[in-house]
Structures are given as C-alpha cells and as structure tokens.
Amino acid sequence: MALISLPASLTRMMQQVNVPFVDTFRALRSITPQEIGLLLKSIAAKRRPKRVPPINSDFFDILGELSPEERLIQQKIRAYMEEKIRPLANSYWERGEFPHEIVPSFARLVAETFGTRPYAIDALGPVLTGVACMELARVDPSIYTFFGVHWGLCMGSIDLFGSAEQKQRWLPPMQRFELIGSWALTEPDVGSATAAGLTTTARFERGYWVLNGAKKWSGNAPIADLNIIWARDVSNNQVQGFIVERGTPGYEVERLEGKIALRTVQNANIRLVNCRVPEANRLPNVGGFRGIARQLAITRAAVAWAMTGVAMGAYEKALAYAQQRIQFGRPIGGFQLVQNSLVQMLANVTAMQTMCLRMSQIAARNGKVSHEHASLAKVFCGEKMRETVALARAVSGGNGILLEHEVARYFADAEALYSYEGTHEMNTLIVGRAITGMSAFV
C-alpha cells in the first residue's frame, strides 16, 4: 500500500495534541469509504444554505372553507393590519395612547368589508365575522377590542334593541366612524354578578331617566361620543339600556390608568350623578338581562376567534425568531426542545381554529350561536391562548420581554382577553350547567 502524505498543518496539529502519528494512521485505516462519504455529506449539508419554509399558522387550511368573495375580505383585512397597524402597534401600546390617525383608513376598511352587509353584530355571517376578528387580533388585540366595543357592543346594542328612529339616527354615522361608541355593564363592585343585579339605578322622572351609579372598564369611553349604559329600573328591577351622549350633565368619565394589557384601548371609570337621559335615548326592546345575555353570546364567540388570532400572532413571531436566532452556530429552530414548543403552539392554534370554525358553522346553520358553544369556545381558547403566548415568550428567551419582538405585547394582552366577555370560571359554569342540568352558580 502506498504511503499517505498528510498536510503539514494536520501533522503539526496532531503533534500539538500529542497524538502519535502511527496511532492516527491506524485509526484512519479503520474508517470505511461509506463512513467518509457520510461525513463529507454531513459537512456539506451544514454549509449549504437551507430553504426556510414559509410561516403558516393555518396548518389545517381553515381559510379554505371561505368562498372566493369571503377570502378577498379576509385578505383585505390582513393586508391592512400588516401595512397600517403593525408598524405603529408597539409604540402606541407602550405609550398607552390610541392612534386616532388610523380612524379614517380603518373606517374605509370596515366600509369595504363589514359595511357591505346589513347592520348586525355578526354582519358577515358567523364564520367570516369570526375570521375577521381573528385577523384583527392576530396583529393587534387592542385594535380588535376597539372595533369589537364600537361595532359589536355599542352598535350591536342599538341594532338589537333600538327603535327604528334610534337606528336611523345613530348607526350610519357610527358605521362611518364619525361617532365612536362605548358600552358599560360592569361596575366597580359588580363584575360576574351583573345578572344577579346592577347597583346603577334608573328612575323615570318627567320625561327623563335619572341615572345614578358607577361603571368600570367601559372600553373606548374616554374617546367615545356615546355610551350604552345598563342600569336597573327602580320601579320593577328590570335592566334597561340607555344611549348616553358625551357632555351629558352628570356623566363623568375618568381614564383608567395602570393597565398592563391592551394599553392602546382607552378604558374608563364612569360616575353617574343624577344624569338625566331623555326617554328617546332609552333602548325600548331590551327585555331584561336575557336580551344582554343574547348579545353577549354573539360577542363571546367573537372573542374566542380573537383569542385564536392572538395565539396565531404569537406563534408566528416565535417561529420567525427561532428561524433567525443563532446560538451554538445554528438557528435555535433546529434544536429539539425549541421545535417541541413550536409544535405545541401550532397544535394549540390549530385546535382553536377548528373549534371556532365548527362553532360558527353551527351558528350559521341554526341562525344563532348558543350560550354553551360560545362559552366552551372561550374557555378552551382562553386556556390554549395563554399556553401559546407563554411558550412563545419562552422560545424568545430574554428578548421575549422586549416589545421590539412583539411577543411581549401578545403575552400581556392575552390576560385581558382571558377575563373579558365573561371570566374563564363563569363560562366554565355555563357549560357545566348545560351538560349536567344543574346550576353551580352562587
């Protein structure tokens, strides 16, 4: 056998590590050509740039259920949120301010999507309305919440419970976002127990309703032109709804400070001190708390979709980070534990999407969404959203607490969605009552 001449650099290296030349030569002789080939192939694979697959949070293609017309609406909303909202979302969130400059363009978006159908909370039908909410929250849950309160709760109340005159007066300018709406049910000392009795009272007196009490949270209230205030009629203890306009004497709005979630949304503490509202501003078709519960079932279903959007946004940002973040000489997305977290996130997102899709398909078939379906969707999606944003933050390491990577914003905002439109516990009990036939409410 011919002698092998090793490069001088390799000889010097072996001498530095005190490896005898004869031992090295014997070791090399024991390596088969196949093993050498595999070694060279492995080295070449590590050096060759790998094609990174596109980020896809719709793994089971739920958007394939949409018609071509509906898909155009979904794509229009996604494009707007990516181009107009994402670049400014972190900045306004950090400052706790609302981006008033986006209202005209947002109004045009709504006119081209939601505004193409009749007035209703779920104007696009249960499925497309849910997908639209998902797309809004996928980029910025604060903008989704602003829209949900204005369109779903305030306009929705007028649409469901208002007179023909009230609808004609208020809904067209609200659709154009010339007037901004708010909605107030929760009180400082009454949250989950609102069905058991509100402490805010309404007393009819010489053509006016006199409101006294307090409300808490009331999204959009500091910037709103009108607010739907729910109060208890002292004459019969029935819940009544009132359109209270900004500037009404006795209607005092104080911006709520110190939030760690949905900071772009403007929330408020409200005081009602002998606030006189004309009879023309009372919603005549409420029918007690059952009417509000019917409205909340629709908006609760929308929140389950929005939770899905939050989980999608967090997953997408975490995956992008894992593809780009280099540690130990390679992207962290190539490590087993990181891939395990990413797959768990995607599984959560996919399960949330499919549950929400089926909930909305049943609602479309039946003409309404049931309380039990909406509550179960919110319970499940709330849990999976929380788990997903936590995994996304962990995958992002220390950078996961920085706004520049966006995961931190999703992580914080998820806590608000987890609690509003009925807490996790109350929605659990709604489903529990449905499946057992026994109420566990206090």
Image (cartoon, rainbow, N blue to C red):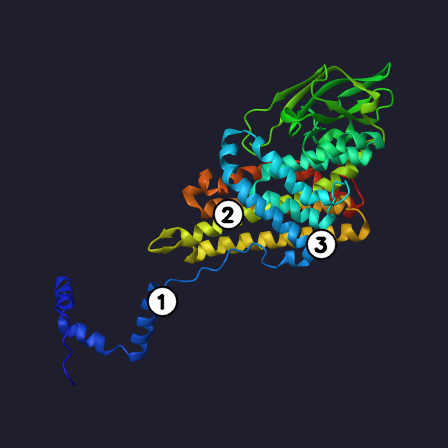
Residue 99 position (above or below residue 59): above
Nearer to me, 29 or 245: 245
Quarter holding residue 104: top right
Name the residue located 52 percent from the left edge and 50 percent from the top edge: 316
Location of mark 3 (residue)? 358
Question: Decide: marks 2, 1 in contact (CB < 8 A)?
Answer: no
Nearer to me, 312 or 389: 312
Q: Amino acid at mark 1?
A: Ala
As helix, strand or loop, the secondary structure at mark 2 comes to helix
Location of mark 1 (residue)? 45
The N terminus - image quarter: bottom left
- On the question of residue 419 being in view, the answer is no
Quarter holding residue 4: bottom left
Residue 98 at x, y percent in the picture: 57, 30
Dot 3 surroundings within 10 Å: few (below 14), some, or many (20 or more)?
Answer: some
Work out how far the residue at label 2 is from the one at label 3, CA to CA, in angstroms. 26 Å
As helix, strand or loop, the secondary structure at mark 3 comes to helix
As helix, strand or loop, the secondary structure at mark 1 comes to helix
Residue 391 circle label:
2
Work out how far the residue at label 2 is from the one at label 1, CA to CA, in angstroms. 30 Å
Residue 384 at x, y percent in the picture: 60, 47
Q: Amino acid at mark 2?
A: Leu
- On the question of residue 332 being in view, the answer is yes
Q: Earlier in the sequence, mark 2 or mark 1?
A: 1
